[in-house]
Image (cartoon, rainbow, N blue to C red):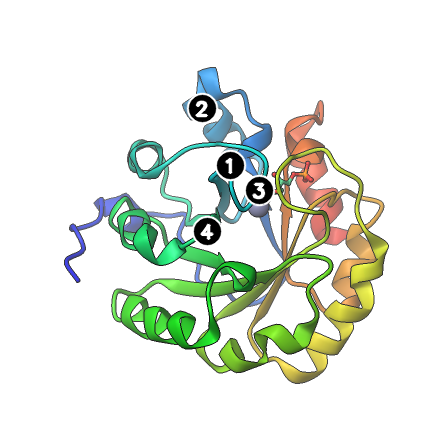
Amino acid sequence: MQINPRTNLKNKLHYKPIGGGVKIAPSLLSADFSSLEKEIKKVERAGADMLHIDIMDGHFVPNLTIGPAVIKSIRRVTALPLDTHLMMENPQYFVKSFVRAGSDMITMHIETIGSAKFKQLARDLKKHNIKIGVSLNPATPLKKIMGVLGEVDFVLVMSVNPGFSGQKFIRGVLPKIRQLRAIFKGNIAVDGGVNDKVAGSLIKAGADILASGSYIFGAKDTKKAIERIRNAR
Ligand code: DX5
Ligand code: ZN
């Protein structure tokens, strides 16, 4: 697989490997897309650890968002790691374009790809220094991802049904996070309805990457909002 050379922005100040402490990933879906660069700089200054970018195909989820071209443009304006969340059927057809566009982390949903294919892709992608995550919907049991846990750097636990920002956090996923924490050493990311009220229970349950869209982008004080979820207990 051919990966284009990355922008050297990545080697500057902001890139932090996943590790040590709770990481906050503002979800760009809640940003003002007419001023994307401004929005990105805003969360960057406010202490975001990475940018969560939602890719929706209108099939796996009932919504459409952006493709690799936009990721490529985002790559040019920020040094933050790009955490690309693929909510699409047949991710194997597109995943490499998202890597070439400059993603640092790629998440595929287990509902969209069999374990065997997932494993094969994950091994291939890792050669290019990409963090690989597997995601599962609120109704998908942990046993579905057991076959790929050994291949991933992180698991993205969905705490809403994917498709839209601004939905209510589903508390029923907390036991799943606890069970996962007991058996999995990588990062546990949570996505959907994350705000200052629920972040404490997520961190206690073992989550260490919190994606958050409407709470962060809707806050008057972005820095405070990020600190509130990072420090919630
Ligand atoms: C949902 C997306 C989430 C969403 C988060 O399908 O994957 O990343 O944008 O937004 P909030 O935090 O508003 O639920
Ligand atoms: Zn997401």
Q: Nearer the viewer, mark 2 or mark 3?
A: 3
Q: Callout 3: helix, strand or loop?
A: loop
Q: Nearer the viewer, residue 217 or 68?
A: 68
Q: Residue 148 appears at what percent x and percent y?
A: 50, 77
Q: Earlier in the sequence, mark 4 or mark 2?
A: 2
The amino acid type of the residue labelled 2 equals Leu
Circles 4 and 2, Cβ within 8 Å, touching? The answer is no
Numbered mark located on residue 61 in the image: 3
Where is mark 4, residue-wise? Answer: 89
Numbered mark located on residue 36 in the image: 2
Q: Compared with residue 151, is residue 213 higher up or lower down, i.e. above or below?
A: above
Numbered mark located on residue 58 in the image: 1
Circles 4 and 1, Cβ within 8 Å, touching? The answer is no
Q: Residues within 10 Å of mark 3 (few under 14, many from 20)?
A: some
Q: Earlier in the sequence, mark 1 or mark 2?
A: 2
Q: Compared with residue 215, is residue 82 higher up or lower down, i.e. above or below?
A: below
Q: Residue 166 appears at what percent x and percent y?
A: 72, 33
> Whole-Å distance between the Cαs marked 4 and 1?
9 Å
> Whole-Å distance between the Cαs marked 3 and 1?
5 Å
The amino acid type of the residue labelled 3 equals Val
Q: Residue 219 appears at what percent x and percent y?
A: 71, 27
For label 3, being within 8 Å of ligand 1 is answered: yes
Numbered mark located on residue 27 in the image: none
Q: Callout 1: helix, strand or loop?
A: loop
> Whole-Å distance between the Cαs marked 4 and 3?
9 Å
The amino acid type of the residue labelled 4 equals Glu
The quadrant where residue 27 appears: top right
Q: Nearer the viewer, residue 161 or 73?
A: 161
